[in-house]
Image (cartoon, rainbow, N blue to C red):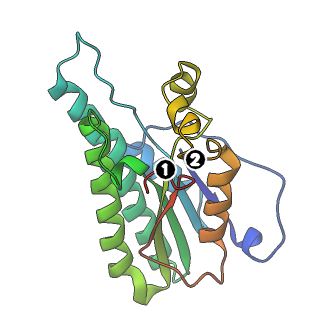
Amino acid sequence: MASYRSNAARSGQWSHAATILQADITLAPDRTRLLDAAPNLYGLVVFAGDPARAAQTTPIEEAMRRSHEVNYLGPILMAREAAEHMRAAGQPGSIVLVSTMQAMALFPGSTAYAAPKAALLHAARILAKELRASNIRVNVISPGVTAAGMAQESIASGKYDRFLNEGIVSRLGRAVDVARAVRFFLEPDNYVTGQALCVDGGLTL
């Protein structure tokens, strides 16, 4: 999923209208279509993911290839192409990529999912360094166990109950916890770039 804030949004003249486009950011024509729909691009948030949990009948190589495309290649290409639009327009900008806590700590069995997300984090920092003189910031958010999206099934199964029962975290994450981090990085006067913020309640500690 990709979203943007317009110049009107930056000036405080918020529009209540939204345009929803269906696209696959692993495909170049779809990325172009998304960027063409946002000519005054300021903020880009790429929150894409595939859990890459290979079923017993799915070869691990197939799961890893799919994960590479969805969790790394599509998001980082979307970010780089968006940055080129911003730079060509001579405008400042903020790009936020969503990784995972599994990219910042070691969880057995997470290779297919975590490795591309770790690559995304590293590539984002490189992009931030390349763009720092252009006033285009690039940051990464790494959520922990969050009661939203693809984690809900695992939460319902009791997979993460021990984190609560053993006092590792006081509660599981909420979507609003991630949204607050996104809002922080998108603020026009923000002075932070090339950083990864782990929003996990301390779980990876």
Q: How many marks do you count on the picture?
A: 2
Q: Residues within 10 Å of mark 1 (few under 14, many from 20)?
A: some
Is there CB contact under 8 Å for labels 1 and 2?
A: yes
Horizontal and vertical percent position of residue 21: 60, 40
Horizontal and vertical percent position of residue 48: 46, 43
- In the rendered image of this protein, does residue 36 appear above or below residue 20? below
Q: Which of the pair 124/29 is nearer the observer? A: 124
Can residue 27 be seen here? The reply is no
- In the rendered image of this protein, does residue 181 appear above or below residue 63? below
- Secondary structure under the numbered disc 1 in the rendered image: loop
Q: Residues within 10 Å of mark 2 (few under 14, many from 20)?
A: some
Q: What residue did someone put label 2 on?
A: 169
Can residue 83 be seen here? The reply is yes
Q: Quadrant of the C terminus?
A: bottom left
- Write down the quadrant of residue 155 in the picture: top right
Q: Residue at x 22, y 33 (%)?
A: 64
Comes first in the chain, label 1 or label 2: 2
- Secondary structure under the numbered disc 2 in the rendered image: loop
- Disc 1 residue type (three-letter): Leu
Answer with left or right where residue 106 lies relative to residue 62.
right
Mark 1 vs mark 2, CA separation in Å: 6 Å
Q: Which of the pair 125/146 is nearer the observer? A: 146
Q: Which of the pair 123/163 is nearer the observer? A: 163
Q: What residue did someone put label 1 on?
A: 203
Q: Residue at x 42, y 52 (%)?
A: 99
Horizontal and vertical percent position of residue 127: 34, 72
Horizontal and vertical percent position of residue 157: 53, 18
Q: Residue at x 67, y 74 (%)?
A: 187
